[in-house]
Image (cartoon, rainbow, N blue to C red):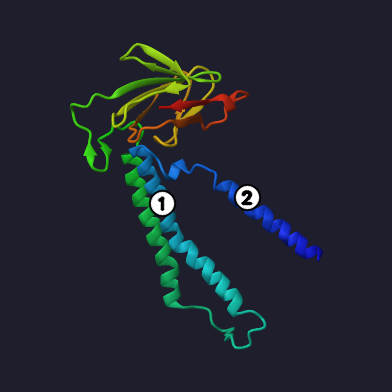
Amino acid sequence: MAKQYRFAGRLFIFLAMLMALTGCDLVVMAPSGDIAAQQRDLIVISTVLMLVIIVPVILLTIWFAWHYRQSNTAAKYDPEWHHSTGLEVVIWSAPLAIIIALGAITWVSTHKLDPYRPLDRLDAERPVTAEMKPLNVEVVALDWKWLFFYPDYGIATVNEMAAPVDVPINFKLTASSVMNSFYVPALAGMIYTMPGMQTKLHAVINKPGVYDGLSSNYSGDGFSHMRFKFH
């Protein structure tokens, strides 16, 4: 009876954890900006390619353990077997092909999604034209808040940022003291902000909304306050 109660308790805890996860916002997998969407696609493609190897290995491990268990007297046992050319070809060629594919995808994506590279498209169907005027935003990571300058408009905001939909955004980022990491999951990837240096990020938001922004790099006592809203 005690074992049954323990099992029921563990099952309850597991189900409670699953229910808690359903409340998580998987914004990384459902972004609202083209750069973040391309990064999402890269995550999915890379994961699928790796699962092509991982899943068969796991299934074969389980199958071998079951098939060659001690109680299965029907399993063939050949202590003299030591080599199979066919297996060698599969074991080496399949992972090698996956590594080559991942390497090619990484090479292309690293250059295509370079945060310093100006945007050449708003989304998969619309290019950036010469007539489009980008929004310039200067970002400063302070202790413990974010300061946003709009040099073309002569205004500044604290912990609030706004940008029009389908307009390229050119970020210039720095920090006043310690290093932080600027991150709006719905918009684009992370980019460091460092004192005495300037980093850049180019992005675009394709859907209206209010999105969370944060520092993804632990920076001290006030780290938990390094959050802002992106409109």
> Label 2 to label 1, Cα distance in Å?
24 Å
Tell me the residue at 60%/74% (across/down): 65
Query: Quick check: can you spot residue 39?
Result: yes
Q: Secondary structure at mark 1?
A: helix
In the rendering, at what x and y percent does residue 104 appear? 34, 51
Residue occupying the far right of the picture? 2
Residue type at tag 2 = Met
Query: Quick check: can you spot residue 183?
Result: no
Q: Is residue 185 above or below residue 199?
A: below
- The residue where tag 1 is placed is 44
Tell me the residue at 59%/83% (across/down): 79
Q: Secondary structure at mark 2?
A: helix
Q: Nearer the viewer, residue 23 or 62?
A: 23
Tell me the residue at 50%/17% (across/down): 176
In the rendering, at what x and y percent does residue 227 appear? 52, 27
In the rendering, at what x and y percent does residue 56 appear? 48, 67
Q: Looking at the image, is mark 2 or mark 1 earlier in the sequence? A: 2
| Residue 17: assigned label | 2
Q: Is residue 75 above or below residue 196?
A: below
Residue type at tag 1 = Val
Position of the N terminus by quadrant:
bottom right
